[in-house]
Amino acid sequence: MRVQRKVDGRACLLDSSGNEIAAVSKFVTGLLARGSSPNTVASYVYDLRRLYDFLESRSLTPDALTVAGGLEFLVYLRGLKARRGATPLADGTINRILAASSSFYTYLLLAEWTGVSGNPFQVASAGPRHSHWARGRGWMRLPRPRRLPRPLSEEQVTQLLTTCTCRRDMALLLLMLQGGLRIGEVLNLHLEDVQYGRRRIIVRYRCDHPKGVRTKSRAERVVDLLEPETLSALSAYITHERPRTGSSQHIFVAGGGSTVGQPLGYAAVAKWFSRKRRSAGLTGSSSTIHSLRHTHATRMWEAGMSELSLQRRLGHASFESTRMYTEITDEAMLADYRKALGL
């Protein structure tokens, strides 16, 4: 089994003979019709490759997979190694594959796919002894430890900002550090989205980025930027450094080369941030581009922002996504402990 990208960028799954698997292609069409991003759809296809590898190893067709077979698939996943290195698949990765498989079977049921009469990853009923299989969204899931966000320290933030050699770099970093924006939201900002007089930007849902960058939330939101550095950096970049070549309304565009004036994509920003990390001497898995958003959210919570306000500022649809920032930090717990002891 292998995943292939078509000319139009759509991902498809091919069997061992090189033939396109029709059920997966129909599922992909449905996801795209619902507005899923090409990257999200590709992730589904890569996850379903694991399912079809399993089915092929057991000489099964999708309609022959039972709930017992779904449990066997879980055991199968626990024995697989990650693509990079010799480490087993992470529990989160396994849960994602199981979720993708469950969504796939739900689609097959709705589409009345020949022979499919049930979803092997959903348990219709369970007694008290087996209720853990039927929790959550209805698919088999592994328990995962609850991890707290890992924000950058003040020293790390300073090191990162000192690597900025141009106005664009500074504006990009500050929008995430002081605005809490996701990288997809930053790359989808248009010139019209900045309101200097009101010291705010408007984050709008967009799906027309030429490089497939999408905003995660479909809800429009206002992000106030009362700290002066961000808007100053943004204004300086747009006025003095942003190329006037091309007609793109996206704020962040390539500054030179054959793509000058074209909107930046994920790949270019990933390489850019990797260089910034090295220049700043940052190592470890906590110093990712998304950690800038974590840093902003943690700062706001520790400074006294309410849970509801933080949820709205970050653009979380569910409070569950915001809750991880409201956990008390070790430093805050120690400070309260010292205060209780009168130290």
Image: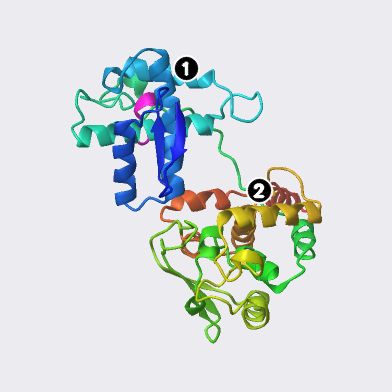
Give the residue pinned by disc 2.
150
Q: What residue type is labelled 2?
A: Arg
User: In terms of secondary structure, where does tag 2 sit?
Assistant: loop
User: In terms of secondary structure, where does tag 1 sit?
Assistant: helix
Q: Does the magenta stretch include residue 24?
A: no
In the image, residue 153 lies at what x, y percent? 74, 55
Left or right for 247, reference 48:
right
Q: Which of the two marks, 2 or 1, is nearer to us in this view?
A: 1
In the image, residue 94 lies at what x, y percent? 49, 29
Q: Quadrant of residue 245?
A: bottom right
Query: Upstream in the sequence, badge 2 or badge 1?
Result: 1
Left or right for 329, reference 57:
right
Q: Is residue 133 magenta?
A: yes
How many C-alpha atoms fall within 10 Å of the one at disc 1: few (<14), some, or many (≥20)?
A: few
Front-most of residues 85 and 175: 85
Q: Give the range drawn in magenta.
A: 132-137
Give the residue pinned by disc 1.
75
Say which residue appears at 67% left-offset and 70% top-offset: 168
| Res. 175 mark | none
Say which residue appears at 63% left-offset and 81% top-offset: 235
Identity of the residue furthest to the bottom in this view: 197
C-alpha span from label 2 to label 1: 31 Å
Q: How many marks?
A: 2
